[in-house]
Amino acid sequence: MKILIVGSGGREHAIAYSAAKSPKVDKIYCAPGNAGIGSLAECVPIPVMDFERLAEFAKGHVDFTIIGSEDPLVGGIVDYFRTEGLKVFGPDQKAAILEGSKAFSKDLMKKYHIPTAAYETFDSPNAAAAYLENAKMPVVLKADGLALGKGVLICNTLEEAKEGVKTIMEDRKFGAAGSRLVVEEFMTGREVSVLSFADGKTIKVMSSAQDHKRAQDGDQGLNTGGMGTFSPSPFYTAEVDSFCKKHIYQATVDAMAAEGRPYTGVIFFGLMLTGDGPKVLEYNARFGDPEAQVVLPRMKNDMVEVMEACVEGRLDEVDLQFEDNAAVCVVLASNGYPVSYGKGYPVKGLETFDGKDGYYCFHAGTALKDGKVVTNGGRVLGITAKGDDLKQARKKAYEATDWVQFDNKYMRHDIGKAIDEA
Ligand code: AMP
Ligand code: GLY
């Protein structure tokens, strides 16, 4: 079969890698893709929000489309494809609201008793500021809509919180996402990312992972899309798993179905393991990036078959299995990310990965210029290595970060350091 992947990041490279392993797949296209994806797929220069051209391309070329990124999902690409009679993997617009509106997802969790932080939602900055006068600090402010994972402010004082309301709701730093504000209780604990497949009724969870969201070592600096991941998380114990299976995963799928918004696709559960048990920090409507880069290489199933089972409503037949090993991904970024950084620097040494089993160089922000790979974004590459255990995987991933060079190369040096405390 022929497939189209929509997106251009490290996550889509990991999806393309898994699709290429499927014996069913004989041709992969990616729109718009990047330089690395180009080695597995034919890249088609159509932007992810151009539904009309994407559907037209899919009609003429492929049997199945996988949507990688959140913007087209929240914008309704799946509805558009279905109306055009195309087979597509991902939640429709009614379901993708789980990521598209934090106010929606918080209300859903409250209504269906899914554990999450206490919160209030505001449409006016004055009402939010008045509420904050009596709120316990620190407090968390979240822009309601999509904000590239950056629309969350943790405020330690009332002054900071009031300033935060202004930043989100009046200055609109995160754009239209800031027309509504969720004010949330601050929680402490370890974070775990759990990705899952859902078919509207059944949910099957993948192996756990942990992201490192801050730009600098020791979880300092600004929030980013994610600077590195490891999988599985040693903190995601059997006890945590059984609690989440009982109170969170199936409950979410059932709640969406009960609301008339059956969810088909990947649900990403951002969890915090608090002293009061696991709680949901956020939902995403797609694979995590860079979570996909450590979870998918460990999956034993044919990913495309699992996705087809979701679309056809027979996920209950699937036995999801993961290798009994570990993986670590270290993101190589351009110095200055997530604020400002240069682009167009030649990337050298990529061929070192050729033929090296258990090592992966997933491209995020790269492009081809005169036939050569150059940097083209803040997060440039995700270097993933598998090992027998997390320590070995971490050692191998960091060794492989030396194989590639580009000007202003920047990475965190403590990805996976937390496992030493497990
Ligand atoms: P989110 O996009 O909602 O996952 O938020 C981004 C990051 O902000 C999370 O990964 C957490 O590190 C942090 N965060 C979000 N909500 C809370 C909360 N209620 N308490 C503490 N930290 C939070
Ligand atoms: N790595 C977090 C995310 O994909 O949102």
Image: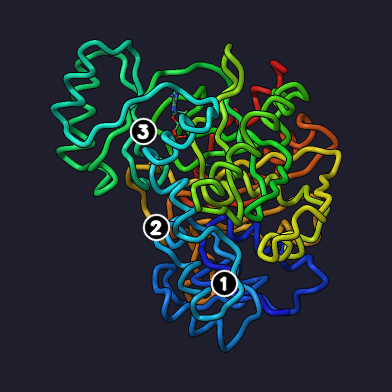
Contact? badges 1 and 2 (CB < 8 Å): no
Q: Nearer the viewer, residue 82 or 75?
A: 82
Mark 3 vs mark 2: in front: 3
Amino acid type at mark 3: Val
Is 315 above or below relative to 274? Answer: below
Q: Is mark 3 within 8 Å of ligand 1?
A: yes
Q: CA distance from mark 3 to mark 1?
A: 31 Å
Q: State the image quarter where residue 193 is shown.
A: top right
Mark 1 vs mark 2: in front: 1
Q: Position of residue 307 (x, y in %)?
A: 69, 61
Mark 1 neighbour class, 10 Å CA radius: few under 14, some 14 to 19, many 20 or more: many
Residue beneath disc 2: 343
Residue beneath disc 3: 152
Res 411 label: none
Q: Secondary structure at mark 3?
A: strand
Amino acid type at mark 1: Cys
Residue 289 is at least partly visible in this image: no
Could you tell me which residue is drawn at 61 percent across and 32 percent down?
A: 248
Residue beneath disc 1: 30
Q: Position of residue 176 (x, y in %)?
A: 25, 49
Earlier-in-chain disc, 3 versus 1: 1
